[in-house]
């Protein structure tokens, strides 16, 4: 590997395969778009140790939840290791515990708003990484599967992620860090969260981010409803046209039968007249 290249790693945890597919897409897209500019690798969470994680520069986490907001099976070991480090650090002197202070990261979380524990595992991951002093290099993305994956993942990759990577390549990391501050997602600007695993991750900055995400989801939902309405109207119009064609066909058949009956009656009358003569 070239020492001058920035090193990016896509790390995924998936129960159904959706997160894995997205992680592979991100890996392939970045490898192709930034050829000769950055190094990109991809790992499943089950293959990543915390010692490995400390050595990485930039990490793009793609992860979902299962059950009641729990980690996917292939992310369980990784998340358990992070949780243990967070708890251990609570019992040691400051600056002597395990740290990820040199790690830059972002989290693309998959969730479903039909569940009460929406984004449970991705948010827990962000909480652990923040507590262990990792830094954010790109705005996080929370994807609601109800609104469609592609509609939300594509803008994140093409705009948010690629823009951040371009600034890193062009040595504009200070500018990027300043933008993270303005977005209220830099570690220093996120309000203090409890290290207790049972505490809620509901600080003011998360609330602001949530409001922004809700607006985006509302817009996506409106677009989806518009498409469904157009589709419904199209179906209705097609059914109406089919019914008209059926009615015309029935009318033609009925008319033919009537004509045939009249001809039969006329022929019968003619025959009777001939016999009478």
Image (spheres, rainbow, N blue to C red):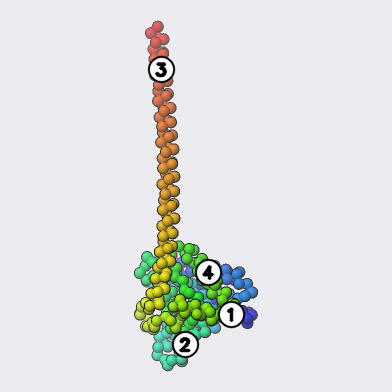
Mark 3 Cα within 10 Å, few/some/many (few <14, many 20+)?
few
Residue pictured at 46% horizontal, 71% vertical: 141
User: Mark 4 or mark 1: which comes first in sequence?
Assistant: 4
Q: In 3D space, how far apart are the residues under numbered discs 3 and 2 (Cα atoms)?
A: 105 Å
Identify the disc placed on residue 36. Answer: none
Residue linked to disc 1: 171
Looking at the rendered image, the disc whose residue lies closer to the viewer, 4 or 2, is: 4
Q: Quadrant of residue 35?
A: bottom right
Residue linked to disc 4: 159
Q: In 3D space, how far apart are the residues under numbered discs 4 and 2 (Cα atoms)?
A: 33 Å
User: Mark 1 or mark 3: which comes first in sequence?
Assistant: 1
**Is there a contact, CB below 8 Å, between mark 4 and mark 2?**
no
Q: In 3D space, how far apart are the residues under numbered discs 3 and 4 (Cα atoms)?
A: 81 Å
Q: In 3D space, how far apart are the residues under numbered discs 4 and 1 (Cα atoms)?
A: 18 Å
User: Mark 2 or mark 1: which comes first in sequence?
Assistant: 2
Tell me if residue 100 can be seen.
yes
Tell me if residue 7 can be seen.
no
User: Mark 3 or mark 2: which comes first in sequence?
Assistant: 2
- Looking at the image, the residue that sits furthest to the bottom is 93
Q: In 3D space, how far apart are the residues under numbered discs 2 and 1 (Cα atoms)?
A: 28 Å
SS for callout 3: helix
Percent position of residue 178, x then y: 50, 80
Identify the disc placed on residue 266. Answer: 3
């Amino acid at each position: 590997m070239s020492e001058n290249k920035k090193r990016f790693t896509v790390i995924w945890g998936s129960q159904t395969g959706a997160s894995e597919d997205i992680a592979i897409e991100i890996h392939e897209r970045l490898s192709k778009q930034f050829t000769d500019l950055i190094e990109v690798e991809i790992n499943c969470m089950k293959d990543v140790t915390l010692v490995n994680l400390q050595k990485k520069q930039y990490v793009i986490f793609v992860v979902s939840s299962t059950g009641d907001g729990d980690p996917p099976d292939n992310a369980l070991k990784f998340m358990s290791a992070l949780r243990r480090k967070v708890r251990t650090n609570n019992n040691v002197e400051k600056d002597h515990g395990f740290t990820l202070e040199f790690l830059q990261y972002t989290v693309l979380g998959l969730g479903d708003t039909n569940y009460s524990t929406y984004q449970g595992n991705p948010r827990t991951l962000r909480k652990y990484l923040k507590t262990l002093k990792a830094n954010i290099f790109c705005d996080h993305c929370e994807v609601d599967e109800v609104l469609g994956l592609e509609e939300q993942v594509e803008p994140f990759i093409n705009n948010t992620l690629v823009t951040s990577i371009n600034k890193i390549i062009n040595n504009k990391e200070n500018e990027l860090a300043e933008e993270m501050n303005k977005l209220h997602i830099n570690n220093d600007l996120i309000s203090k969260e409890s290290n207790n695993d049972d505490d809620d991750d509901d600080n003011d900055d998360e609330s602001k981010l949530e409001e922004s995400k809700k607006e985006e989801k509302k817009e996506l939902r409106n677009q989806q409803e518009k498409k469904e309405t157009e589709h419904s109207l199209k179906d209705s119009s097609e059914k109406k046209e089919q019914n008209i064609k059926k009615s015309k066909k029935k009318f033609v058949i009925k008319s033919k039968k009537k004509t045939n009956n009249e001809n039969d009656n006329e022929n019968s009358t003619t025959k009777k007249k001939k016999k009478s003569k």
